Amino acid sequence: MVSKPFAYDSLRIVLQHIEANKRFQLASRIPSIRQTEKAVPLKINTIKLDDNNHFVVNQVEYRVSLYFEIYVPEGVHYQNMYGHFEDDIDEFGFVKRSGRRTVLPGDLLIGRPGLDVEDDRDDETQMLELENELKEEEGCLLKFQSAILQLAYSEPDEENKNKINGEHLNLLNDRLDPLQFVAENKTHPCGIKLLKESLTPFYRRRDNIPLPYTPLIQISINGKGIDQVHRLPYNMKVYEAQTRLAFIIFGNRPCAIKTGSLEQKFCEIFRLPVGVKFYIQELQINGNITKIYESIKPIIEETSFPLAVLQTFQNHEGHQNYDHEVVKTAQKLVIGESKRSVRRVNWFNLFTSLNNKIVHKILDDKFFSEDDYVRCLTVPMKVDSQGRMIQISYGTNDYELASLKLKIEVVPTNLA
């Protein structure tokens, strides 16, 4: 029996009800439906704009990186294993970080781009510096090995063992027992290996020796039953591959992508195609509200405002602008500032000044005193413009105050 392809209208209806990641998978495998898939409005529950080289859609992670085939340099073993090497390399193995400073049309520039500066000194100067450092490290290692060999044939007390470990912690890279170090024949601590790896590209360039491994562009897709790795020839920059993947997923869609929650993680540059728009219900901002909101505002459909939920988080010292329009107009405001950034904030005064319908403070951790909680319970409850009570709640890890009903919730009630 020969199967018949879907009619156009039938295909549109089916695609509307398929989960976003499954739609991407189908379109990648069936070229004939790609144009229709792009035309059908896309719905996403959650999207996270994470590090410069990856994003997450409905708990499925899409990551672009370099992969080293056959031989893996010591300094990038971990990144190679987990697909986290996001920089480029040249024909001799020198790491090139220019992608961290390259902003393309459509990209979101959040904060400042990477400030890594290439060392412009000549090869001979850099090699001499690294070789001298290597000799010094190897000399320290010989002395250390001699000392612990003496300990091996004596009755070392704990004080001497700790002294040796403390003096050579940079070589050991952990607090190994000196006798264990000898027994396991650890002759090349991590620091020495990394110095040798740093010298290797200089020797290759000097002697015109090609790389002993094959670098490839790797695209990994993981989560919710999906575990895929695609490796492609390294004929473009890593950041160009990131842009290309973002275009395949989000580009050429005539309608705004309907999104339940858009979360901006801690990234500097996020690659997106020109013109992409998201219609969102919830926005999560990690960092300074004013700066980050202005950076990501171009990709948010105007009809998303006022937001149903705005969640903020800042883990360093700095002032948050709770008078910003996007904060004041959100129906629900979730504040997640951590300990280091909340010491100068009078939370009681802030909470009593907010007019959001629902306000929640995540993990208070003793920045509210018992008196503050009692005050919050006794102040007259505010109502919004429609006469409904405003709901305020707090989270805490302080079990000593649990009896005070720290999670205070006033369920919105129609007072009319």
Image (cartoon, rainbow, N blue to C red):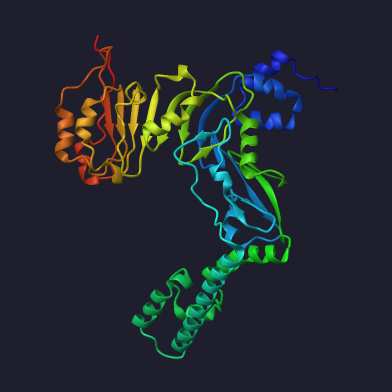
Name the quadrant containing residue 380.
Answer: top left
The quadrant of the image that shows the N terminus is top right
In the drawing, does residue 249 fall left or right of residue 32?
left
Q: Residue furthest right?
A: 1
Residue 220: percent from the left, percent from the top? 63, 44
* As drawn, 203 above or below 140: above
Residue 178: percent from the left, percent from the top? 45, 79
Q: Residue furthest bottom?
A: 153
Residue 274: percent from the left, percent from the top? 59, 27
The quadrant of the image that shows the C terminus is top left
* As drawn, 206 above or below 337: below
Q: Nearer the viewer, residue 44 or 1?
A: 44
Name the quadrant containing residue 361.
Answer: top left
Q: Residue at coordinates 15% horizontally, 34% vertically from top-left?
A: 374
In the drawing, does residue 328 fall left or right of residue 236?
left
Residue 84: percent from the left, percent from the top? 57, 50
Q: Residue at coordinates 59% horizontally, 58% vertically from top-left?
A: 76
In the drawing, does residue 167 fall left or right of residue 182?
left
Q: Nearer the viewer, residue 34 or 95?
A: 95
Q: Residue at coordinates 34% horizontally, 21% vertically from top-left?
A: 329
Count every numbered label the image shows and give the total.
0
Q: Nearer the viewer, residue 103 or 177?
A: 103
* As drawn, 77 above or below 20: below
* As drawn, 68 above or below 289: below
